[in-house]
Amino acid sequence: MTIKERELSINGRVEHIVSLLDSKKAEEIEVFDLSDADYIAQRVIIANSIGGKHTFALFDHLKSELKPKGEEFLSSDLSDDWIVTDLGDILIHIMTPQYRQRYSLEEFLAQVSKKES
């Protein structure tokens, strides 16, 4: 697989994940392209849930839809307020708005991206 084919593949996977999150009412979904940065993943997806049960429901929906398509969930850390899951080249953060505001991942990821540009 060429670099361009891999890039198209990851972009398609990210679009599908964003679509799945959006279909289950995740809010403020953002995607960070870190393929040119020295970071543990090429893409990071951040989405808000409306609460603890919704956080778990979004995660369960992703697992049930993505695993049959061959996505491998390498590791996941789960709590009512924040779930992060590692798909290898994609990290997905689902969190309550309060946690998202507290940890400001967007600022951190923007800095990581700028350092390598």
Image (spheres, rainbow, N blue to C red):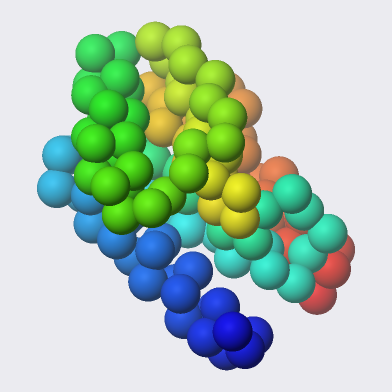
Q: Where 2 falls versus 78 (above or below)?
A: below
Quadrant of the image containing the N terminus? bottom right
**Left or right, 105 with reference to 61:** right
Q: How many marks?
A: 0
Which of 49/43 is in front?
Answer: 43
**What is the quadrant of residue 14 in the picture?**
bottom left
**Left or right, 70 with reference to 82:** left
**Left or right, 89 with reference to 81:** right
What residue is at 23 percent from the left and 57 percent from the top?
19
Q: Position of residue 40 (x, y in %)?
A: 74, 49
Q: Position of residue 81 (x, y in %)?
A: 43, 15
What residue is at 34 percent from the left and 65 percent from the top?
15
Q: Position of residue 10 (x, y in %)?
A: 49, 69
Q: Can the viewer see residue 74?
A: yes
Which of 23/111 is in front?
Answer: 23
Q: Can the viewer see residue 101?
A: no
Which of 67/14 is in front?
Answer: 67
Q: Where 58 falls versus 99 (above or below)?
A: below
Quadrant of the image containing the C terminus? bottom right
What residue is at 84 percent from the left and 68 percent from the top?
116
Q: Where 96 falls versus 36 (above or below)?
A: above
Q: Position of residue 112 (x, y in %)?
A: 77, 55
What residue is at 38 percent from the left and 23 percent from the top?
96
